[in-house]
Amino acid sequence: MRQIFTDTHCHTVASTHAYSTVHDHVAQARKIGLQLFVLTDHAPPMPDAPHFWHFGNRRVIPRVVDGIAILRGMEANIESVSGSISVPEKLYPILDLVIASFHEPVFEPSGIATNTEAMINTILSGRCQIIGHPGNPNFPIDVNAVVSAAKESNVLLEINNSSFNGSRQGSSENCRAILEAIGKQDWKISFASDAHIAFDLGKFDDCLRLCREVGFPLEKVATRTPRQLLAFLAEHDKAVALELDDWCQALP
């Protein structure tokens, strides 16, 4: 039985190392009982990213297709110790959600102090709602300090299912430490598949297993249902929460 009904992190062929279209993701969501997903293709200057025009034109994508809600997001890059993410100002009103992540081609891996400073400054900037795959072992962080900043700024840290089975090998123990720290500090998390092909959309098996192992309650997964996710985005003054209110109220 499905326990998580949204997926806040997936890629389309607009990110050229991914292999599925928006239509593919909609079909897969219907097949597996997922109710909402967020398109979060890579932003420049990642080598495989589309032009910023791609994100601006996402307004042509319907809010709901075949009963599945589609949010317009972006996986932006943490670019400096100051926490800058180079997203054009005019895009922020268009984007429903911004994930900020470390990527090796953009931010060179460094020591714990530098990585932590960069991540915390990104969180405090108010420019993102989620930190993507913070358990990446190439970017060690002071977990407790990052969780504290995230809670203070109402930013979610992501437990990324792909980190357990291919990408960012060695992330498992870091993800465990992050989940445990979030539990101790009474904060919330997001789950994400980070699907680069539609067949992986909505897959959270390893995220759920980790929650069971550490006794983390699913009620604190802020992205568990569309209602929870949209309520979180409303706290960030995102118009999509109102735009999808009727759709959300009609859900079973």
Image (cartoon, rainbow, N blue to C red):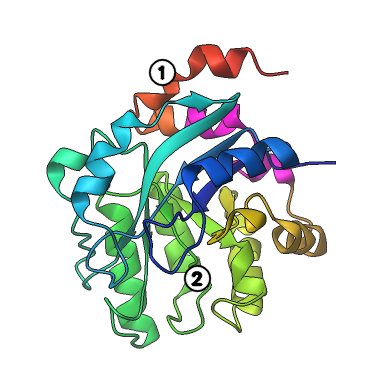
12 horizontally vs 84: left or right: right
Secondary structure under the numbered disc 2 in the rendered image: helix
Q: Quadrant of residue 46?
A: bottom left
Is 171 or 124 nearer to us in this picture?
A: 171
206 horizontally vs 106: left or right: right
Q: Tell me which label, 2 or 1, sits earlier in the chain.
A: 2
228 horizontally vs 5: left or right: left
The location of residue 216, given as percent across then percent down, is 73, 54
Q: Nearer the viewer, mark 2 or mark 1?
A: 1
To which residue does mark 2 refer?
143
Secondary structure under the numbered disc 1 in the rendered image: helix
> In the rendered structure, which amino acid carries the disc numbered 1?
Glu
Q: Do the residues labelled 2 and 1 touch (CB within 8 Å)?
A: no
Determine the residue positioned at 48% across, 68% down.
134
Magenta stretch bounds: 218-232
Up/down of 234 relative to 161, above or below: above
